[in-house]
Amino acid sequence: MTDNPADGVVLTDTGSSSSWTATQLVRPGLRRNPRRAHLLVSTVLGKHIPVDPDVVLSAGQELAALVANAVDGSDVDVLGFAETATGLGHTVAAALGARCYLHSTRRTVPGMTVYGQFQEGHSHATDHLLMPTSPDLLGGHLPLILVDDEISTGATALDALRQIHSSADRTHYVIASLVDMRTAEHLDAAESVATELGIRIDNVSLAQGSVQLAAGLTETVLGLPDPRFNPRAAQPGSVERVDARWPAALPDGGRHGFLRSDSAGFDAAIDAVAATVDSALEASGPVVVVGHEELMYLPLRLAAALQNLGHPALFQTTTRSPTYVLDVPGYPLRRGFEFTAPEDESAVRYLYNASAPNDATLVLVADAPADTDALAAAAETFAASGTDVLTVVVSGADPAALEIARRARPLRGPEFGSYAPDEVTWLLKDLSAVSLEADIDEREKAIQAGTAHYAESLPVEYQPDLAYRELFEKVLQESASRLAVAVGTVTEIVLAERGHDIALASLARAGTPVGILMRRWASAAHGLEIPHYAVSIVRDRGIDSVALRYLAEHHDPRSVVFVDGWTGKGAIARELTAALRDFPEAEFDDDLAVLADPGNCARTYGTRDDFLIASACLNSTVSGLVSRTVLNDSLIRPGDFHGAKYYADLAPADVSRHLLDTVAARFDNVRGDVDASVAAVRGSDRTPTWSGWASVEKVRREYGISHVNFVKPGVGETTRVLLRRVPWRVLVRDGDAPEHEHIRMLAAARGVPVDVVPDLAYSCMGLIKNVSDGHAS
């Protein structure tokens, strides 16, 4: 054997799909392992050799571009393989904007469930564990990308694929690697698995190659003298430590799943850690950032951030791999360190090379489980070589807190609500078994006294008499075409201005039937199947942040269109804008799409007339048998969606689907009217003037009312006052207007006076009674 003991490993380029060749991407090394004596040392991964972080990120992004082509730009999930590809997989996932990134792990985590396990037969550590916070992260229908740095036989990837496929309905898998060394026989094995499982398996890599081993290589390597670890210098380097905090509910990597919505928080946390580390380093001093074992992506991003702050930086990590070290030209593993594993003192870990020009500081990055005496001892071992060491412990990420944050599960009919399961996904917590209804008068007193918030309880569901139900049917038949025109108008405007790749998020519950009708129009007019969700927003409390995270995980936040039934004085529109502005994890558009905007506080609407929307006439029996939403600290824990009840017992009186079907049946007849309406709306000045708010203030002053919250303008809001609040009086512009015949009927039933106010800005207003002194002031 020559001076380079790896000359018995011959690499050959057989193809390239990128700017790289296989012989550029890997260099042959050796390890004293009877299963496989050679090791392909990556030049771009940052595991055994220090690498410029920009090179590492660039290689991963180039691989991601190949994956994107293989899936035709589809949304994806990504699985990375421990330990070497945890950072590569995360880089690929980040470049693709993947819904979820998960990497296998060899670290046991107390309290976490192992949802899957597979083997890597030739490895120094064979077991791979899958420990997402929820098994749902392993399921789904999206293409799954399996990422490794180097594919030798593909057996590990196929084993993982089988494990995951057994509990998922995916049909497309992509095996992605920096370099693919498989033979035709290995590729045929993958095709056989695809045929067996009825799935598609694609293969992408930056380069392809082959490896040929000299005869007797394993015996030769096992016969080499013991390698020399832990070099020592005459003058050891210094050892210092800095602690960097990390948000408890933010993953510091992909071990338990990293969702798309975690990205913004991760970026901000990296910047904070970089600032902390920068303050502990000499200005512009060079660094080698060393992550510990599976913790690769966070240190990689830290190295890139420090480089942006002026520190010349290289990146690599420690490893479990016991390779052969020899300081000879051309061999990639020139020096090595062996040390006790910080998180498992019965095992050993390794660090190779760990050098850079200009006396670089070694920045050793570890997470909280590795913060033991053995970590401090490892830092001393590295420093003994003459290198200054700065240990950075990134602590705070808590799998239990992360699991709680991801506990919310969406609901669908028929288990929850009376709508069809494909028409709406409720991002709500089911509180059907909880008694939340309070007497309307007592509830109103508590709300007005400030001892309770209106969203903490529910009013008793008002069930109208036969005459009112007959009136609802009459109103529905008379207004269905007008509703259909408004539905078509607002949907066409949304599609024209936001594109076809959107998701609707209705504000529960008034927005829910509107969102379903918009979805039906898009399907009937354009053949689109638009995802539709119902989310909760609560005045003075904001929109459900857990629901926003869910939307961001499953869709591009910029594609989410928020939907409501109508605007009153614009309080909910203001609430939505404020809540989205204060949500740091994703960038949503606050343009609220509504059927009717009599308050002049939305720019996307079907009409600005204050007309009767039939779904405002009733409560849950016209809204999928779902209650108004609930936000109660005793029931809604951190990580839960806001809550609601499903009134299954009211099914005999349910007209929810009847309303939808009646309006949708008019779609074909109103196409021409919709075209004219869309042209008129888009050709007009749609800038919100908030004139509705001004008119409410005027009424408040004239009637001596203490707060605008006691004034509910418009047909829909006035109906709500009569159905679930304590009304004081009703104001109408026209005493005989047909659009509020049902309001006059409700007012008479509850003994509420109706005042005719000819110059009223809305067709009607409802004034809530001040229960302390008998009027609304």
Image (tube, rainbow, N blue to C red):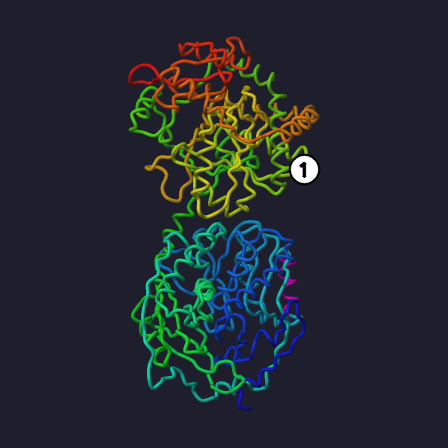
Q: Splitting the image into 4 quarters, where does residue 686 fall?
A: top right
Q: Is residue 562 left or right of residue 728?
A: right
Position of residue 592 measured from the top left corner of the image (x, y, whole percent): 52, 34
Residue furthest bottom as drawn:
2
Q: Position of residue 439 (x, y in %)?
A: 34, 21
Q: Per the image, is 190 magenta?
A: yes
Residue 88 visible? The answer is yes
Regarding residue 624, the answer to whether it shows in the image is no
Prevalent SS, magenta region: helix
In percent of width and height, residue 159 lies at 54, 63
Which residue is more in the foreground, 237 or 504?
A: 237
Looking at the image, residue 277 lies above or below residue 732: below
Residue nearer the viewer, 173 or 628: 628
Q: Which residue is mark 1?
A: 527
Of residues 171 and 375, the one nearer the viewer is: 375
Q: Is residue 658 above or below residue 25?
A: above
Relative to 723, say whether 149 is above or below. Answer: below
Q: Position of residue 306 (x, y in %)?
A: 44, 65
Q: Is residue 210 left or right of residue 751?
A: right
Which quarter of the figure has residue 724?
top left
Tell whether 530 sits left or right of 643. Answer: right
Read off the magenta span. Answer: 186-196
Residue type at tag 1:
Gly
- Return the residue nearer the eye: 448 or 159: 448
- The residue at 54%/71% (across/down) is 44
- Image quadrant holding the C terminus, namely top left
User: Which image quarter is the N terminus in?
Assistant: bottom right
Q: Residues within 10 Å of mark 1 (few under 14, many from 20)?
A: few
Q: How many marks are shown on the rendered structure?
A: 1
Q: Residue at x 45, y 89 (%)?
A: 225
Task: Check residue 617 for magenta coloring.
Answer: no
